[in-house]
Image (tube, grey):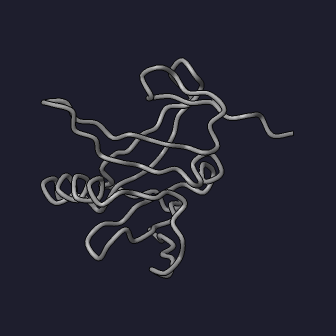
Amino acid sequence: MTVETFNPSATTPVKFTDKAIRHLQKQVINQSAEGIMFNVKESGCSGFKYLLELAFDVDGEALVYSLNEDLNLYVLPKIIELIRGTEVDYVQEGVNHRLDFKNPNATANCGCGESFSVEQQS
């Protein structure tokens, strides 16, 4: 398996807050994963659903970005334009917690914030 690694100074297509990085890093360490795979799939009430999953068996096409010296982010090239510029935050409200996505490419979001749509490119 060959995974292309970018220079750590390369700009990641997605930005994560420090809180989100700490949360994800705990998950990766607790599960002995390679890092986090950021993906989207067609689903939800608005068209696409965000997927952040622990990466155990990394797709050979995945691009890898270093979020810090202990946390890698994997992204498939085919979704980069859907998520470029997205900001991910970890939000805690009382006993509830979630990852919050702010995607500048989204033309619509569902009420629960889990899915989004983008304008079709011609």
User: Which residue reaches farthest front?
Assistant: 94
> Which of these two is toward me, 53 or 94?
94
Q: Please indicate whether residue 33 sits to the left or right of residue 49 in the image.
A: left
For image coordinates 63% across by 51% down, the residue present is 78
Residue 70 position, x and y percent, is 25, 72
In this picture, is 40 found above or below 69?
A: above
In this picture, is 55 found above or below 65?
A: above
For image coordinates 62% across by 27% down, the residue present is 108
For image coordinates 26% across by 55% down, the residue present is 19
Find residue 77 and report its image quarter: bottom right
Q: Please indicate whether residue 77 sits to the left or right of residue 71 in the image.
A: right
Residue 67 position, x and y percent, is 37, 68
Q: Please indicate whether residue 84 sits to the left or right of residue 112 in the image.
A: right
Q: Please indicate whether residue 56 sits to the left or right of residue 107 in the image.
A: left
| The C terminus sits in image quarter | top right
Count of labels in the image:
0
Residue 26 position, x and y percent, is 17, 56
For image coordinates 19% across by 30% down, the residue present is 96
In this picture, is 63 found above or below 14?
A: below
